[in-house]
Amino acid sequence: MRGRQGKAPEEASVDLTPMLDVVFILLIFFIVTSTFIQEEAIGLEPPPPPSPDTPPEDQQQSILVYVGEDNLITVNGRYTELAGVRANMERLRAENPDSALIIQAHPRARTGIIVKIRDEAYNAKMDRVNIVQSEE
């Protein structure tokens, strides 16, 4: 036993440099090949004000759909369900074909309901649809 020297076993080491190179190459690849989606938002433009030289009786009537804070829907002051909004819009439009639609929403109203009302207006072939936000 004299010939043996007490050497401690060497620790195994792993070289991480090639793995980091691969990770950086994959990162660059995914950044270069990724596409970014440009989302579109719903515009909240108020309707144009009536001209001052037009008498009030000649001004066109508007259909007002109001969505309250508690997501209750009124069409020209009458409460209605979401399913009945289109029928009410078509009835009021039949009475006055030149009427514009104004969707007025409370700031805390659910956006999904507003979008569904707008879609129903487009399905009812309403030409002029304006979405406005009401003051609290």
Image (spheres, rainbow, N blue to C red):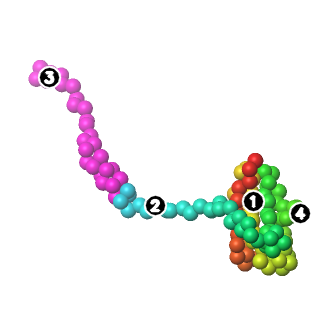
Identify the image quadrant of the N terminus: top left
In the image, what residue occupies the spot 22% across and 31% down?
Answer: 10
- Could you tell which of marks 3 and 4 lies nearer the N-terminus? 3
Identified by mark 3, the residue type is Gln
CB atoms at circles 3 and 2 under 8 Å apart? no
CB atoms at circles 1 and 4 under 8 Å apart? no
Image position, residue 84 (x, y; %): 84, 69
Identified by mark 2, the residue type is Phe
Q: Which label sits on residue 78? A: 4
Left/right of residue 21 with respect to residue 81 in the rendered view: left
In the image, what residue occupies the spot 71% across and 55% down?
Answer: 133
- Could you tell which of marks 1 and 3 lies nearer the N-terminus? 3
Query: How far apart are the alpha carbons under marks 1 and 4?
Result: 14 Å
Rendered image quadrant of residue 49: bottom right
Say if residue 24 shows up in the picture.
yes
- Could you tell which of marks 2 and 4 lies nearer the N-terminus? 2
Q: From the image, tell me which residue sits under label 1.
A: 104
Residue farthest to the left, as pictured: 3
Rendered image quadrant of residue 35: bottom left
Q: Which contiguous range is marked in magenta?
A: 1-29
Image position, residue 39 (x, y; %): 54, 62
Query: How far apart are the alpha carbons under marks 1 and 3?
Result: 90 Å
Which residue is nearer to you in this view: 82 or 90?
Answer: 90
Q: From the image, tell me which residue sits under label 3.
A: 5
Q: From the image, tell me which residue sits under label 2.
A: 36
Residue farthest to the front, as pictured: 53
CB atoms at circles 1 and 2 under 8 Å apart? no
